[in-house]
Image: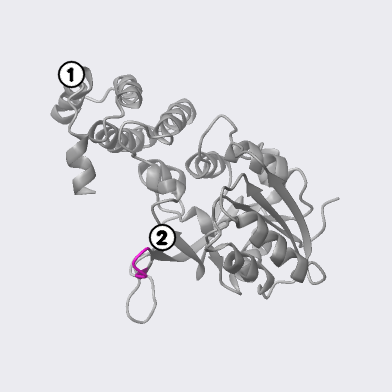
């Protein structure tokens, strides 16, 4: 049964022992009270499961909590969809076990979605916290805290094809639409690029001008391996999403945006010596009719398998 106004937070943790307590506390401390939490340990090899158990014992009287513990790590997108099917909320938060919600994040986000119920999701700004303890906002702000550039939402589909302009950890979904569209694509290794594109193609997307979360950026995070030398797990999924975009594009401007994305991903695939995804990106580039000197050089690079990934690793 779907409960009006309820927010379902799905928190998936993997080897997040250092951060999981703070993540769960941030759910408890939300100033939005109509919520449920599903917390999952996805086969951690550290003491994350014990940390979750200890926290749940203390908090279960204050909050609706379901827990799931896996011995072996499950594919993320499939796992999320299984959990999504168990939720009762009108709104969905996909919370990583190493991130932190600010207390008013859900209330601000839900307020926007209530005003525009036809929207698929709302996103906001984030504090990015790196291993050195340095913090910056995802979007540039001036000393007064105001955005230095206004976000253009009218052509958000085209913009998302061209570059990553949304901090996915801030997203709060309209659950009805997310379920209708089948949740995450279970054939993919990661979810955010694809789900944002699919939803932006068909529905309005909202922005809430608040800083909603602390997003940790560290070497063990999934995104850190996006262009991993020789064996990126993410690039093959990126190629699949680019292929899907090509099939759903409707305007020449959208294909131009996809050309930019393919050239960007191809550059990183070649530099990191991920030659099989590079080969597929080159094929997509041919289908799009990319013809320039840079693309010709990339085609030759991919054909010859020139490996200078050692330099790429040094430059990153």
250 is within the stretch colored magenta: no
Q: Counting other residues with Cα less than 10 Å from the Cα at mark 1, is it few (<14), some (14-19), or many (20 or more)?
A: few
Q: Is residue 71 left or right of residue 88?
A: left
* Residue 198 makes an appearance in the image: yes
Can you give x and y, in whole percent of width and height, for residue 105 in the image?
Answer: 59, 69
Q: Which residue is found at the position 43% from the left and 50% from the top?
A: 220
Main secondary structure found in the magenta portion: loop
Which mark is nearer the camera, 2 or 1?
A: 1
Can you give x and y, in whole percent of width and height, for residue 235 in the image?
Answer: 39, 33
Q: Counting other residues with Cα less than 10 Å from the Cα at mark 2, is it few (<14), some (14-19), or many (20 or more)?
A: few
Position above or below: 271 against 115:
above
Q: Is residue 173 left or right of residue 144?
A: right
Q: Secondary structure at mark 1?
A: helix
Instruction: Specify the label residue 151 is tagged with.
Output: 2
Q: Quadrant of residue 246?
A: top left
Q: Which residue is found at the position 59% from the left and 65% from the top?
A: 23
Specify how the rendered protein is coloured: one colour
* Residue 116 or residue 60, whichever sits in front: 60
Name the residue beneath numbered marker 1. 304
Can you give x and y, in whole percent of width and height, for residue 189 in the image?
Answer: 51, 35
Q: CA distance from mark 2 to mark 1?
A: 41 Å
Q: Which residue is found at the position 25% from the left and 35% from the top?
A: 267
Q: Which residue is found at the position 28% from the left and 38% from the top?
A: 264
Q: Which residues are magenta?
A: 131-135
Position above or below: 97 against 164:
below
Position above or below: 286 against 134:
above
* Residue 94 makes an appearance in the image: no
């Amino acid at each position: 049964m779907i409960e009006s106004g309820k927010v379902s937070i799905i928190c998936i943790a993997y080897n997040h022992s250092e951060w999981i307590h703070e993540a769960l506390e941030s759910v408890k401390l939300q100033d939005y009270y109509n919520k449920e939490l599903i917390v999952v340990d996805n086969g951690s090899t550290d003491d994350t499961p014990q940390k979750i158990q200890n926290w749940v014992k203390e908090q279960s009287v204050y909050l609706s909590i379901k827990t799931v513990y896996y011995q072996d790590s499950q594919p993320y997108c499939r796992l999320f969809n299984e959990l999504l099917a168990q939720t009762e909320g009108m709104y969905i938060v996909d919370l990583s076990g190493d991130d932190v919600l600010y207390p008013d994040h859900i209330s601000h986000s839900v307020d926007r979605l209530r005003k525009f119920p036809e929207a698929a999701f709302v996103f906001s700004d984030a504090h990015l916290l790196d291993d050195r303890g340095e913090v910056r906002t995802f979007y540039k702000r001036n000393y007064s805290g105001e955005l230095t550039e206004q976000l253009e939402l009218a052509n958000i589909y085209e913009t998302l094809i061209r570059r990553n302009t949304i901090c996915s950890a801030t997203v709060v979904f309209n659950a009805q639409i997310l379920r209708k569209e089948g949740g995450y694509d279970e054939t993919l290794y990661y979810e955010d690029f694809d789900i944002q594109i699919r939803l932006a193609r068909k529905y309005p997307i909202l922005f809430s001008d608040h800083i909603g979360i602390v997003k940790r950026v560290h070497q063990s995070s999934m995104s850190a391996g996006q262009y991993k030398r020789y064996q990126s797990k993410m690039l093959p999924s990126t190629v699949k999403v680019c292929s899907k975009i090509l099939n759903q594009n409707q305007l020449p401007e959208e294909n131009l945006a996809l050309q930019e994305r393919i050239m960007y991903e191809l550059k990183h695939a070649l530099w990191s010596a991920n030659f099989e995804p590079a080969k597929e990106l080159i094929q997509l580039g041919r289908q799009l009719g990319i013809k320039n000197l840079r693309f010709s050089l990339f085609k030759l690079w991919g054909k010859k398998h020139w490996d200078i990934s050692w330099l790429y690793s040094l430059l990153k």
